[in-house]
Amino acid sequence: MKKYFRSYFIFAICALVFAPGTLQAQQDKPWEKIPTPKLHEFKPHQPQRIELKNGIVLFLQEDHELPFVYGSVIIPGGSRDEDPAKTGLVGLYEQAWRTSGTAKLNGDAMDDLLEAKAAHIETGGDVDSTDILWDSLKGDSEQVLSLALDLFFHPNFSEEKLELAQQQMAAQIVRRNDDEDEIARRESAKLVYGANSPYTRQPELATIGAVTVDDLKAWHHSTIGGKLIVSISGDFDPAAMEAKLRAAFEPLPAVKIAPPRHDDFAGPKPGVYFIDKEDVNQSNVEIVGLGTDRRNPDVPALAVMNEILGGSFASRMFQKIRTELGLAYAVNGSYGYAWDHPGEFHATVLTKSASTVDATKAALAEIDGLTNRPFTEEELARAKDNILNSFLFRYDTREKVLAMRVRLEFYGYPADYLETYKAALEKVTVADLNRVATKYIHPGKLAILVVGNGPEIKPSLDELKLGPAQKVDITIPMPKQK
Amino acid sequence: MQSRCFPWFWKGVWALTLMAMAMAVAQAQDLKSFEQRITTKVLPNGLTLIICERPEAPVFSYSTFIDAGDVNDPSGESGLAHMFEHLAFKGTSEIGTTDYAAEKIALARVEAANNAYEAEFLKTVGRDEKKLAELKQKFKDAQTEAHKYVIPNQFTDVAERNGAEGLNAETELDDTMFFWSMPENRLELWAWLESGRLADTVPREFYKERDVVIEERRMRTDSNPIGRLVEQFAATAYVAHNYGRSGIGWPSEVSQINATEAMEFHKKYYVGANIVIAVVGDVKASEALPMLEKYFGRIPSGPKPEEMTTVEPKQFAEKTLAIREQTQPFYLEGYHRPDYRDPDDAVFDAIQDILSNGRVSRLYRSLVRDQQIAAEAAGFSPFPGEKYPSLFAFYAVPLPGHTPEQMRDAIHREIDKLKTADVSDEELAMFKTRTRADLLRGLANNQGLANSLAEYQTRYGDWRELFLQLEKVDKVSKADIRRVANEIFIPSNRTEAWIETQPAASEKPATAQQDGGAQ
C-alpha cells in the first residue's frame, strides 16, 4: 500500500524554506470565506480514579456503545532495568508469561478457550514497564477477568515456552541487519545513548541464552510489588467492577516505589558514521543528538519548533527537501522529549545513493536554519493552528482519555497535564522559538549516520567536509559452535 | 516482540469479513440501527455520498474511495494511478497558486518541453546527445518558470491548519483512497477542499513529485529484500493480468509518466459514477446534505469506466523462483483463487483464519510451536488485490539453521490435512465468532467505519453488505473448506518463491560463520 506520506514518522524535522512570511500576492482565497461555526459543546469523559490503601490505582472508564470490556494492569520496570548480561530478558518474559499460562490452565489451553470467544489476554514489555491486557465481549467478561487475574497472580513460567521465546528472539537477532531502515534506527539511537546504555543495548544470542525460568520468576515477583495501575474500559457495571478489583488487589502489601534512575546521557560523539549495505539503492541518513524530557518547561516551545521544522506538509524540511528539491519521499525531524528521560533529536532523510551528500547538506542547512534563520509570526501562527486545531484528537474517544490518564499516573504527571500543556502552547511566542532554538539546537554536537550502498554514494561522504566517515561494525556476534 | 513481516499484506482489518453466531447482537450495533443512522444519496453526477451519524465527539472522518488503482494503469504507464494520487495533494486552480491563468500557460509549456525531451530521449537510432542536453535544459527552465506561480503545499496547509488529523491517501492495485479526520465545524471547508481536488486537479510540480515517488519505490521495493521478493513473486504468478505488474511502477515506466497521461487517467476514472465518499461522525445528514450536494455536484459526471477484458488464464505449470540475497532466508508461495464476488469468498476467509489467526492457528502450532522450525508462518488472501482473481498465499520465516525447503514441505503438509480431513467443529465455530467480533470492534472507529462503508458500497453496490456478509460466513461448512482446498491448493496452480542467503560480495568466502550466515 503506497501512501502519500509515511505515516509512522509522526514527528517532524528540519528546515528552511520559501519564506513562508513573504508569499507573493495570492489570488482570491475562497476557503477563507467559508464559515467556521462554533464547535459543538464537548467535555472529555474522565475515568473514575480509585486509589487503594496500598497505593495501587484503579481507573474505571465506562463506555456502553459496544458490548466489549477491556482491561489492563501496568507494572513499573522494563528492559532498562534488566541485568545487562541478560539483555532481552523482558522480551522473553512478555512472551513466556502468557504462553506458559497458569498452573490451572496452561497457555495453549488458554489460547483455545479465549479464541473460541474472540477474547484475548496478552502480556507485553517495554523499556520502562510490562503489562497484561485483556478484552472480550461483555458476556464473557467475568470469566476473562478471572483468567487474567489468575495469570497475573499465579503465572507458571515453563522451560518449554521460554525456549520457544528464545528461538523466536534468536530469529530476530540474526535478521536484524536485513532491513536498512531497522539498522538505521537502531544504530542511530546507539550513537545518541551509547551502545551499552540501558535504553539501546541489544539482545544478543549469548545474553538471551543466559536467561532462565528462575530469572523470569524473580522478575515477575519483584516487579508486581511496584505501583500497579489497573484500568478497565467498556460496557461494565462500575460498582461491581470496583468490588472485584478491590477484592483482588487490596490484599497486596503497600507498593514499593523504585528509586529514581540515574542514567548518564552524554549524547553522541559528533561526526559522520557509515554502514555499508550492498543490496540497497537508497541511503538512510539519520542526524541525531540528545533531546530532553517532558518536564522541561521549554517543551511547549520545542513542540511548536518541531512543527515548523518537520511536523507538517508546510514544515521547513518537507517543503525544502521533498517538495522543492524532490530529493526524498520520507523526510522528518524533531527535537524529542520522553516522559521521564531525554529523548532524541532526530532528523531522517531517505534519498537515492547519488544524492546522499546533497540531501544530507539540505537537512543540515535546515537544522542550522533553526538558529540562524529567525522564526516568523507566520510560521508561529501556522504551527499553532496545526497543533491546537487538532488537539481535540488527543481525547476524542473515551479510550484515548483513559490511556492518557494512565500514562500521566504512571509517570507522575498531574491529571490536568493536557490542559496546562495546551494553555502553554497557546502562549508560545516567536521570541520563545528563537530562544529555545538557540538553547537546544547545537549542530556541532550532532552525529550523522548514513546507511547505504558505499560504491554508489558519489560524491562520497567526504564532501560533507565533516571529517572522515567512521565505519560502524554491525556484525552479529555468533556464539562458538558447541 | 513485534511481528516483522508483511504488515502491508493486510488490507484494512475491517475489509475482511464477518459472521453471526448465536450470541445476541446488542441493539446499538445491528443492521437496523445502522440503517437509521446512515443516509445514502446518489447525486445527479453519479457520485454516492454516505453519511453515518455517530456524535460521540465533535469530530468526523471521511473516506473518498475511487474505484481505480494501479491495475488500471495503461500499458507502459505502470505506477500512474499512484502518481495521480500524489498530484491530488498539489492544489487546484483556486488553491496553491498566485495566478492560475498565467500558471496554466506555463504548465502547458512544461508539458511541451517534456514531450520534446522525451521524443529525443526515446530515439533508438540517431539520438543527438547535444540536442538532448539542450532539451533537458529547456525542460528545466520551463519548470522553473511554472514554479513561480506555485504556493507549495497550500492545499495540505489549509487542511492541517484547520485541524486535519491522519491526513493521507493510499493507492492499491484495485482502488485509491483519500482520508482524514477533522473537527465537525470544518465540514464545509472539507467539502470545498475535497470536491475541489477531485474535480479541479492541476498537474502542478508534477515532475518533482515523480522524483519523490521514485524515492518511494526505492524505499519500499528496491532497498527492501521482502519488497524485492514480493514484486518478483507477483510478476511470476501472473502471465496476463495486471496483478502481475509492479504497483508502484517499473522504474523505466514510472520515470517517464507525464502530466498529460496523469490528467487523462483523471478524466476517465475520477467521474461521479466511479466515486463513493463516506463521512462518519458528528454530522447531521439532514443539515449537511444540501451543502455536500452543492460541492460534490462539481465533479464531472461520466460513464462508469469499462471493466478490463483480460482474465488471468488458468495456470497449468508450477513455477518457482529463487532470489539469492545477503539476507536471511524466507519462503512465500501462492495459489490462484477467484475474485471477492465468488460464492466461496467466505470459505477462503475461513481457511485463512483456521490456518493463520493467532496462536491457535494450525500453521503456528505446527511450524512454530511443535516442529520449531519457523519464527512465523501464516496464509493470507486475497493478494495482491481482491477485485480480480487473486492469490491465496502462504509465507514462513525460518528459524536459524532451517531452510525455505523445510518451510515449503511443512506448509504443504498442513494444506494436505485440509484436503483430506474436515476441520473441527471448534475451528469452524471459532472462525465465525471471531469474524463477528472483529466487525463489531471496527464500528468504534470513525475512520475505519468510513473506509468500510465506502469500500462495501463500491464493491457490492450497498454498504449493508458489510453486515450481510455475516450470513455468508455463517453458511461456510466443513465440506466447503475441504472442497475448496482440493480445488485450489494443487501444484499446477502454485508459484513458489524464496530467498536464499548469499554473503555480501565484499565478504570473504565462508570461514568462521557457518550457522545461519548472519552478516
Image (tube, helix red, strand yellow):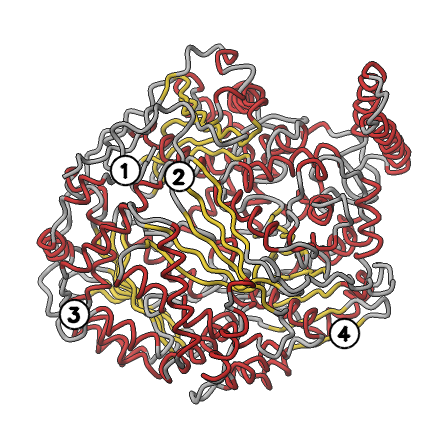
Tell me if I can see residue A147 in this picture.
yes
The x, y position of residue A70, in whole percent, is: 35, 70
Three-letter code, disc 2: Thr
Q: Residue B143: name its quadrant.
A: top right
Image location (x, y in percent) of residue A53: 14, 65
Judging depth in this view, the residue of A396 and B474 nearest the camera is B474
Pointers 4 and 1 within a single chain: no
Q: Please name the residue that numbered disc 2 is placed on.
A: B501
Q: Which chain letter matches label 1?
A: A
Along the polypeptide, which appears first: circle 3 or circle 1?
3
Q: Callout 4, which amino acid?
A: Lys
Q: Which residue is mark 3?
A: A102
Say which of marks 4 and 2 sits in front. Answer: 2
Tell me the SS state at disc 2: strand
- Do marks 3 and 1 share a subunit? yes
Q: Chain of mark 4?
A: B
Q: Nearer the viewer, mark 3 or mark 1?
A: 3
The residue shown at (83%, 44%) is B93
Indicate the amino acid at tag 3. Answer: Thr
The residues bearing labels 4 and 1 have C-alpha atoms spaced at a distance of 54 Å
Mark 1, secondary structure of its residue: loop
Residue at which label 4 appears: B41
What x and y, as percent, mark residue B372?
Answer: 26, 57
Q: Secondary structure at mark 3?
A: loop
Q: Is residue B26 above or below residue B393?
A: below
- Quarter holding the C terminus of chain B is top left
SS of the residue at dot 4?
strand
> Where does label 1 land, which residue?
A199
Disc 4 to disc 2, how far (Cα)?
55 Å
Name the subunit of mark 2: B
Tag 1: amino acid: Tyr
Frontmost of labels 1 and 2 is 2
